[in-house]
Amino acid sequence: MPTTITEPAADVVILGVGYMSGVIAAELSIASLNGGKNYKVVAITKGPYWDYVNDFSTTKYDEWGVGLGRKYDSPLPLQSATIRNTPYQFALPVRRYTMPIQYHALGHGVGGAAQHYGGTMGRQGPWGYTQYSSTIARYGASFLDTVNPHSDLEDWPLTYAQYEPYYVEWEKAHGLCGDYNGSATNQPSDTGYPWMSQNYPLPPSPLTPVGQSFQTAAQALGYHPFPHVSALASQPYINQYGVPVNPCVYDGYCGGPCDYACETGAKANAAYRTIPAAMKSGNFTLVVNSFIFRLDTDPISGLVTAARYYDPQGNVHVQPGTVFFNGMWGYNMIRVMLLSGIGAPYVWNSSPASVTGSVGRGLTNGYLPYRGTNVSGTLPNNGGNAYPAGNGSGGSVDIYDLMDDNFDHSVSALAGDPPFIGGAEIGAGGYPGGGPGNITFAGGVSSASMGGTFKTTQKDKYLPTKTTLSSTPLAHDLPTTDNYIDLDPHYTDIYGDPLSRLTYDWTPNTYNGATHLVKKVKDIFTQMGAQNVTIGSTVAPGAAHNDWWGHHLRGGCRIGANQSTSVWNKWNQCWSPVSKPVFNIFGAGEITNTSGDNVPSGTHVAGPQSYRAAEGIKQYLALLTPGLLT
Amino acid sequence: MADQTRREFLKLGLAAAASAVTASAIEIPLFNNQNSSMQTKLDNANSQLNNANSQLSSANTQISNLKARVNTVVGFVSLSVTEQSLLEKIVETIIPTDTDPGAKEAGAIYFIDRALAGDYGQSANMFMDGPHVLPRIPASTTNTLSVNPTLSWANLPGNSSAPITYTGGSIGTPGVGAGITSSPRVGSGINYQYPLNFREFWRVGLVALQAYANSAYGGNFETLSSANQLLLLQDLWGNKPTSFSNILPSDFAYELTFMTWAGFLMDPIYGGNQNMVGWTFTGFNGVNFGNFYGEGQDQKALMVATAPTRLKPASLAQYQQQASGGT
Ligand SMILES: Cc1cc2nc3c(=O)[nH]c(=O)nc-3n(C[C@H](O)[C@H](O)[C@H](O)COP(=O)(O)OP(=O)(O)OC[C@H]3O[C@@H](n4cnc5c(N)ncnc54)[C@H](O)[C@@H]3O)c2cc1C
Ligand code: SF4
């Protein structure tokens, strides 16, 4: 008979132990970082503690089990999500992992999704934080209405300059690799990020020949190329918490559509960067294999009093605490808040003026490979060992010249292309590593994948004597009032609680941006000496297609300056509902992203928010009278 | 009731394997030079590990020997005799044997057979709960869809148990109540909405395929010319059969094509890609990172090379055997 067990109270209760939570765990449990205070920190997560030596080192190359079976990821029978394009549709549940397989491959266990991500990183620049007001100021309010009907775009509460110190801490903790000014690689080129005050802690991985070729071509065209920023350690490293890090061994089986776990811990995530420091503090308790399903609230104050979770035997545990950090991945963060009645739930209306609430509001999607137009070409005399050598995100070169507001977006400047704001990070040269799944199955299979003719195209395919270039600009996706997350009325998780329901369709801005950017990519490919450079056909609006839902969903639980449209204030502290804020819960993660964003990662925007939240929590714990931080 | 039992069963298995542990029970592998008490613990753990490792390596050798055998053993654990002969011809149509080995030499059918007997066939990592509403109601359909909410949703404050009606809503213009009622325009894991696990799906699909072979091509699939065999499979992709046991023919064609290629290319440990013929054909080195057979290559150098280097592939079983100290 399952029973209910009440655990000893903690100062800080961390919900879900992924990337963001690791930072909170380290920052709040190490007394020397808290002016000597010993806070008792308890962190609860579903899934196990992964140890790369025992769990991954000899088994991660199992492509069938890892890539398709997703044996390290969130089991779908435990919990899935439903998806639809418009609020008028019945949402269908995601029933399986497919190829390309990472759609819903969310994290499970300590380290979360970053146990098996590509490690693409970077920073969001100044424009990203003020994109609403900057756009209005430069192009006028009606321009935004044109590019983003039903727009729900807002500025962040703070500026880039105010967030920069948190970026620095985040980058140090995780040993990010890059070179923003050429100093680490002795490159003649300069400024990928003119607004960075110091370089990344580690140099980039060696550039692949394709990366080098892209660099030369981009430079010749007047762009500012820089090595791709990655979270896969290029060298041995020790972070500010004294946690040592192994370097990458470039064995492939790393990124790409299959996204593998890492056998050396070089792939930065909480389990091998921040959690070890928390463990050493003596103030930290880690509870694994436990599924959080409710937050209890005080009927009078409305504040969170405890987290409720199921242990593997089905017993219910109640974990009381003073302050809570919501570090559950993406829609789980929202789901548990909605199930527990915390904050004002977002209520959709076809008229943007009539929508209400904030929990679930402003969903965007940062990864749209098959919608945007694709450019391809072939680089002769340049082949190599694309598989499995390489790592998930190192070795390539990027430019930022075609993103943010780094070029003129006015209608006259776009040479007849439909208008948009933002743009995309453009780059080339990364070898995702990985096995057949990353090549033969990269786009799924079709009627063309059968018979002798197709078979011939696969011969020696993994030993290319020339390189096939391909780029799909992942243009800027903006929040609208029609894209959101709520609870599904029909499907439940294994414990009987409603699943998250995702209502999402592309915004014209994303589509228009890609249409324009592919032409620029074509120019770069041509400059690289590529042959047969062609722009592929776009997927028509409304056509069925593959899309990578899930792993880069952003927004939906936003940080903001407007209390009625955001969940978290500038301290990442909950200030919803306006009438009676539940102010003892804090949050960070991709899902707290306020605005659209045009770098294919997304964690780079979320990461610094975990440091901001840690500071907020410390301030909150120091308050004599608990309340909203100002 | 049956559903309830399954849920109880899954709950215990899925939430986790081990019981909740606290920090002290977990060793962090990289921490040895940081903390001396950690170090002592680690040393103890290491010596235990060494003992375990030597036991493991002898066990591993046995396992590898067994696996090596499994890979060459011909025999079926799931497919019936009728299914075997039909599927054999299907996989050979998808990846024919020419001057190079095809699905036949790779033993793709054994890969599929074992997958159907295991997690794939059981749909073990799938979300299988109802309601089962089929997607792809044609865009032209204006029928509304009315579905009862689950009790747990209806019990949340502000919700009711009244049926919920969906009117569709056409693309990009919310507010227009016509169009696709239940079909997001994404293939992202939502295509498969059948109340069947994959073993059942294949059973039904193979029967339907054989029936179509007879009605449209005048004989069992096995008896058709190879040109017609390929045409028939193309028909499935194009959803030509009008009756196909209530499954969308292209959904079945997807599984057939995908699983055949998987049987050609996945690690031999799963019964296909026998003798690594699929890897040799595609030039993939499996888990040979440049020095498995003493080639003296280095991954970092291979990564930045402009010309390809052909390496003899190594399999997972070989790799694990080497890693555990075996030969
Ligand atoms: C396939 C894939 C590829 C990616 N590639 C990149 C990339 O190249 N670059 C990049 O920057 N980002 C990438 N990302 C995104 C990156 O992994 C995430 O942004 C990051 O991990 C988010 O951190 P988090 O702390 O918010 O959540 P996570 O790290 O996912 O942690 C969430 C934790 O909460 C736990 N949890 C969730 N629900 C519950 C519950 N109900 N009860 C208990 N515990 C719960 C989970 O088990 C997990 O441990 C990728 C993500 C995926 C899925
Ligand atoms: S390539 Fe490097 S970062 Fe990627 S999984 Fe291997 S060791 Fe880890």
Image (cartoon, grey):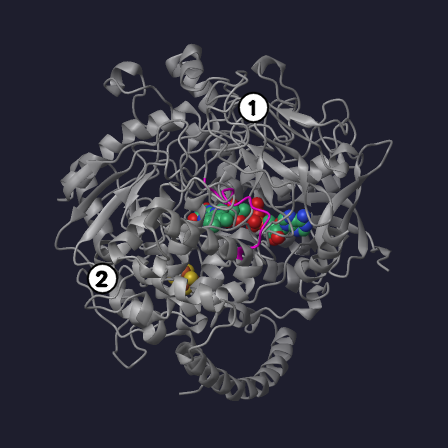
Mark 1 residue element? loop
The main secondary structure of the magenta stretch is loop
Residue drawn 59% across and 31% down?
A: A90
Residue displayed at 25% across by 35% down: A536
Range covered by the magenta-colored residues: B187-198
Q: Where on the picture, by quarter, is residue A225? A: top left
Residue farthest front in this picture:
B218
Residue under numbered circle 2: A459
On residue A54, the disc is none
Placement of A359 over or under A205, stated as above or below:
above
> What residue is rendered at 40% in x and 18% in y?
A147
Label 1 resides on the chain identified as B
The residue lying toward the viewer, choosing from B174 and A431, is B174
Q: Position of residue A345 (x, y in %)?
A: 68, 28
Residue A571: in magenta span: no
Left or right placement of residue A541 versus residue A427 in this view: right
Q: Are marks 1 and 2 in contact (CB under 8 Å)?
A: no
Label 1 in the same subunit as label 2: no
Q: What residue type is labelled 1?
A: Asn
**Residue B194 belongs to the span the image colors magenta:** yes
Q: Viewer-proximal residue, A564 or B255?
A: B255
Q: Mark 2 lies on which chain?
A: A
Say what secondary structure mark 2 lies in.
loop
The quadrant in which the N terminus of chain A is found is: bottom right
Q: Name the residue under label 1.
A: B143
Q: Residue B184, can we see it? A: yes
Q: Ligand 2 appears in which quadrant?
A: bottom left
Q: Where is residue A390 in the image (x, y as percent from the top left)?
A: 32, 60
